[in-house]
Amino acid sequence: MKPTFLRCVSLNAMKSKLQYRTEGCITTASTSLLRLGTETRPTHAEGWSGEQITGSQPALAFSLLPVHVAFANDAPVVLSPATVAMPSTELHYDRAPASPRGQRTVFLCISKDVLCQSIARRDPAAIDRPDNPYPERHAPACPRASAMARQLERLVFHTSLPSDPLFVEEYAMHIINRSIDTVYDSILPTRRVPRSEPTRRTQRNSINRVTALLCADPSHPWSLNELADHVELSPGYLCRIFHAHTGHTITRYRTIIRVMHALERLADERGNLTQLALACGFSSHAHMTSIFTKLLGATPSALARSTPRGITESLRRLNRLTQNLNGQQRRL
């Protein structure tokens, strides 16, 4: 099942917003877990000649326009939308434009430890080579991951709304997981081994602990690292098993919980819906209205004017969404 994402921006998340930085043709947005970047370099811009060097974190780069690249000790290649580049830390390379439009790249940089934990699912030896955990420096790209990377770039850099760090981190981890699986499948296809019942039980316990945290305080600006540390899992693995067991991403599940909390308090707060929206983790009354309309097909104002039976039916509808947790578990 493909991940379903529902963008959610809370007031607290706005307080802990992404850290933006621009240097020349490169713009980045950083969280405590990773760094998302975009590079738009016309052919007439500086930076094409001379040897380049990658940063201190491993990267995953999607070239939206073809570009000639020669990594250290490797033959020159053309990176294109059909490939994904996986440069290691402090790697020397040369590049040249392969398109009259220059270079357009979206890249993700993530801490060595987190990346090694994600790759270790397919290659346990990656833990022993943190400076160069990837099996290749470039490989076929996962079309879905490439599209997700472009979408994430648009959401973070080309919209006026602030981005929720948890959403960005979770979305990025899905991109990384999909890309890693595609790379290893292209090198050595492997048959997936069914999980044993103890493994499934352990995963369910971890998911239950995460959902308990989200339910206890839906407005809290959880980061993916914090949630993963709480259940002692890697961020990438938590994203993978949460969606496998619930049918939802963590961000969407949190959004459903916020709507449920708002519905339960709607009768008491009908005179001040803005205050209710902020208390439940939404950035504004308008944002809460947008989410309500998407999930329930009705605005908070309309539901506040409805009978208690109408609110109860909306809660049942949301409960059916969250009950997917148990249904997914039975099918695993």
Image (spheres, helix red, strand yellow):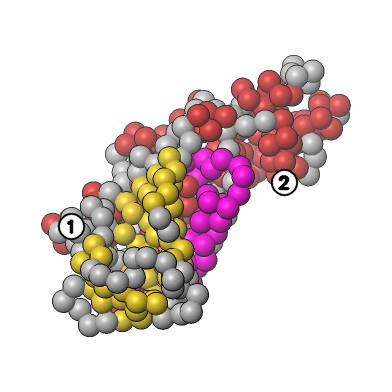
Q: Which secondary structure, mark 1?
A: loop
Q: Where's the C terminus, which quadrant?
A: bottom left
Drawn side of residue 252 relative to residue 94, left or right: right
Residue 144 at x, y percent in the picture:
50, 68
Please give the residue where the numbered disc 1 appears in the rendered image: 131
The amino acid beneath tag 2 is: Lys
Q: Magenta segment range?
A: 139-167
Quadrant location of residue 39? bottom left
| In the depicted structure, whether residue 108 falls above or below residue 314 | below
Mark 2 or mark 1: name the one nearer the start of the chain: 1
Residue 302 numbered tag: none
The residue positioned farthest toward the left in the image shown: 128
Quick one: 217 or 170, which is closer to the camera? 170
The residue shown at (81%, 30%) is 301
Residue at x 67% of width, y 30% of height: 284
The residue to which callout 2 is attached is 294
Specify the quadrant of the image occupied by residue 132.
Answer: bottom left
- Taking the magenta stretch, the answer to whether it contains residue 150 is yes
Magenta region, mostly helix, strand or loop? Answer: helix
